[in-house]
Amino acid sequence: MSERGKVMSIKETRRGGAQQKLWAFASLIVLVAGFSLASPNFFQVSNIMAILQATSVNGVLAVGVTLIIITGGIDLSIGTLMTFCAVMTGVVLTWAGMPLLLGVLTSIATGALCGLISGTFVAKMKIPPFIATLGMMLMLKGLSLIVTGTKPIYFNDTPGFSEIAQGSLIGRIVPAFPVPNGVLILFIVSAAVAWILGRTVLGRYTFALGSNEEAVRLSGVNTDAWKMAIYALAGGICGIAGLLIASRLNSAQPALGLGYELEAIAAVVIGGTSLAGGRGTILGTLIGALIMSVLTNGLRVMSVAPEWQTVVTGAIIVAAVYADQLRRGRAG
Amino acid sequence: MSELVRMQSVDKRFPGVHALKAVDFDLRPGEVHALMGENGAGKSTLMKCLSGVYQPDGGRILIDGAEVALPTPKAAKDLGIGIIHQELALMRDLTVAQNIWIGREPRLSFGRIDEARQNADAAAIFQAMNVAMDPRAPVSGLTIARQQMVEIAKALSYRSRVLIMDEPTAALNDSEIAELFTIIRKLRAEGVGIIYISHKMDEIRQISDRVTVMRDGAYVGTVEAADTPISAIISMMVGRELSDEAVRIPDLSGAETALEVRALSRGRELKEISFSLKKGEILGFAGLMGAGRTELARAIFGAEPPERGEIRVHGKPVTIRTPSDAVRAGIGYLSEDRKHYGLALGMDVRANIALASLPRYADRLGRIDEPQLAGIARDYIARLSIRTPDDRQEVRLLSGGNQQKVVIAKWLLRDCDILIFDEPTRGIDVGAKAEIYRLLNDLAAAGKAIIVISSELPEVVRLSHRIAVMCEGRLTGILPGGASQEQIMALATAREGMTVE
Amino acid sequence: MFTRRTLFGAVAALALIGPGSGAFAQDKMLVPLISKGFQHQFWQAVKAGADKAGAELGVTVTFEGPDNETQVDKQMDMLAAALANKPVAIGFAALDSQAAIPLLRQAQEAKIPVIAFDSGVDSDIPVALASTDNVAAAALAADKMAELIGDAGKVAVVAHDQTSRTGVDRRDGFVNRMKEAHSGIEVVAIEYGGGDHLKSTEITKALLAAHPDLKGIFGTNEGSAIGVVNGVRELGSKGITIVGYDSGKAQTDAIREGLMAGAITQNPVGIGYETVKAAVAAAKGEAVSANIDTGFYWYDKSNIDAPEIAAVLYE
């Protein structure tokens, strides 16, 4: 191909990247418009808030796992890690009676520490991420049950804890727009992670690891350390998800968590992040998570039979990824 | 003599590119017709038109004098046109015979595969090729050269009368090339027409009957190989004369020693290797495939750390266990396989140049100073004349020579003053090669210490101030610059017990 | 074979760390209970009752169940492992009664009596069933709901499962009672949240969006009921009558606060106790009555602290 040809194709790929996000966003708009037409009860402020709120936990998990998927890895432990973080928060707040801030820090630190352990399995011990985090998923699930003695821990003694996800700082300033804090936190976490990915060394290495890990290592970069840092960051984000779910349920439910990882991964994939690594955006993941919750909420509001809701959700995941493949095939 | 293939004013456009401009080409039975041109000249596009991958926008393709349509690769195969791609397309975990008959397996009842017949048929093809090959051997255990034999057998299994070979010798050593040429000559004697794409001039002289040169998508001319000097072919390719300058060896007697390696050993691959390298010097490493040159480079760089031995940089001993240790000591390694080990292909030029030096351009929060990096990237693009529309171009879209320059820029930015180039011009076309040579000389003149590993003897001779030769994991001798290829070959085949001082 | 391997691993680990491995000795009768769950408070209460009976009758009782109520396959593995230990009798709460029949037949051939608990098995192999009459209990929930909303209007059900016996019985018991006895009430939606608190919360919010004139919601187990309470609380909806099932601290708190009107409680301790008692009797060849009703109660703010209610509620 001549130089001119190359110039053309790069412009096309760049446009392709923007187009992809545009497409995902367009599908979201189409879904919202479709449901709004189908049911007058869908496009109501309270229902939209409910959808946003329903996105918060899955969205934060998805943002965290996006980092790991961009490196070419996978993390199956995010769901049970979220639960474990919630449980440790309960231990600190309810059992030990520590102040709220300490509980928040505990959750994030627990997540980061567990992420670091997963990262060590993957980077230092060279266990494939799927297996390493599968093991972590089971260990954390068991630990949650052991620590709690299978009983939920309630946060009744910590006033203000439920405000973390359920209160609305924005609503206090703009009463007509009572965006729950959980949603606010989701957006803040997304913005922060998008910034890290786009502007920092950690972010650059995240993409580079997914693009060609060996080339990065042979550039003299300590890939093991960076990989561990990325898993730890993702773990810390799971800790935030743990706070959100604990705050919404006002309790740490040790039995929850399994299955949440797959929903988060689905959101990431719908958002156009490649499971092969090297490619992905937080905005895409956010849109993917919103598509998931709009879909489940919309189908329920339309009173579609529950069995069919599941079928439709599965079909949409496959269709979204297929559409992405088509677009990519055309761009390349 | 009748014609096997005739392509008449074949035209092909892609959006924004006129890839083929009324190209003519013909092939006779029983000839080897070399197709030459720099990367991007349109050779591959032309061959894709002939093998049914692309549809030409204009012109005609005639087989045995009759015009044909080649709407699919299968249609081309059915007409007896076989193609062997540069990057081999074999399934590593299947056997030789399974690879050859994939998609056309002889069947028994109930969909069972007739493995016995499959193996026997494959054996027959290898026998006709005069190659000893076990059809039941898994492909993953074969060398690249042997895998190529499998590709050829696969193409022949379609009863190909036209065989297109795209850079078949890129990964082969001399004895393997000789074996390949024997097969090509045998096929030629049987009347198969062979289209041979290569950058290696000496091969063209050895094997081909006629040479067609393309440049910028256009047909330049066809000449008889036997009575055309190489310099004439090169000038047809690049559109200008290339002077074959001899190496100028600088006086380095006063130069400081940059790198000293003492008794470096690892297993059977590296045995007690010692040498030193001065600032401003280019030390060439010659040897046959498997002599241990790449292993030596990777050992010095810490990619696979040595078991014993000492490495001194600027007189001080250093411990190198990982590539990051080596980089900290100022050693950069440019792998022979840029795509796998040198570049993050999906990332842009700027990010690749900065890959080894990122923390230096970030603040305490880890925030990258993009404007500064952009300036640096543009500076290197200008200094090394990297041909790219801008610094945000994805590296995978650059040509091989320009990719190589991006890797060089990466190490220069990291202040590495000892650079190890492993096959620096592999897969790079002639014009760009000269440019890389000039760049290496400039770097040496600027005081960098350079090691060049190359399997092309003329390249080693042309570049090196001194030539180190390896054989079977040992350093068999160090020759002064300008040594003859015969001297190098003598050392490269000097087996244990006959080390030359 | 992943489940098998985890199971073996778990058994091996238990054998190593279990202080009571001596208790598996032959001198005591072994009665394993394979339950539908393990982590929910309800099952912990059943276990407490079973342990109590075990201590009184001098038999070794083991208790296990899968992580959630969809893991029929894991429950089968557990049942198979329990049979392999040569117990004198088995207590079994089937997630899917059809799936269990081959294993139950094995038990029958090995002359190991099976006591079904919590929910029945569509088979004549179990010699007795110790359970709450879920249909009748859900019908009582329907009557209470009707009474609270004035016998007219729209209600919805957030159920925990669409295939298990308890899920089906409670849903049908509630819906059919409404049809038969309360024609002014329409059940407009039935959704399934798998007993997951958060999923049930989202379902409730979607239901309230879809049906703004909804007057009441019935949550068919602990997780579903808590999810309904959460959803209503998050939306801040007023005038929704919530009827729950089972107990647990979150539910009892909601009742005390007045957010939940009331709930049906089973007698989980009784279920566990009666199951082990019947198992031991059957093992000794004594006669056992085929249906052991372990009872259920309606509780609300007014009687939540009454001794007979407090005794069957769990935290």
Image: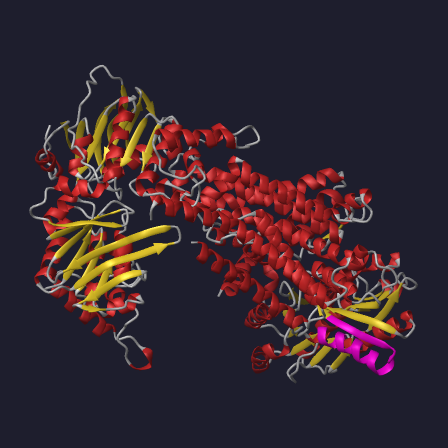
Q: Is residue C219 above or below residue A246?
A: below
Q: Quadrant of residue C241?
A: bottom right
Q: Residue B322: tell me if it is visible.
A: no
Considering depth in this image, is A216 or B318 the residue closer to the camera?
A216
The residue positioned farthest toward the top in the image shown: B254
Considering depth in this image, is C10 or A256 the residue closer to the camera?
A256
Left or right position of C104 against B99: right
Look at the image and say whether residue C179 sits in the magenta stretch: yes
- The image quadrant where one finds the C terminus of chain A is bottom left
Q: How is the image coloured?
A: secondary structure
Left or right position of B148 against C140: left
Considering depth in this image, is B294 or A314 the residue closer to the camera?
A314
Image location of residue A290, percent across then percent down: 64, 55
Say how many tags the image has: 0
Q: Quadrant of residue B458?
A: top left
Q: Residue at x 22, y 71 (%)?
A: B118
Left or right position of B366 against A45: left
Considering depth in this image, is B285 or B264 the residue closer to the camera?
B285
Image location of residue A310, percent across then percent down: 62, 68
Which span is picked out in magenta? C167-190
Look at the image and say whether residue B146 sits in the magenta stretch: no
Q: Residue C279: tell me if it is visible.
A: yes
Image location of residue C273, percent across then percent down: 75, 69
Predominant SS along the magenta part: helix
Left or right position of B308 against C202: left
Image location of residue C308, percent across then percent down: 87, 66
The residue positioned farthest toward the bottom in the image shown: C124
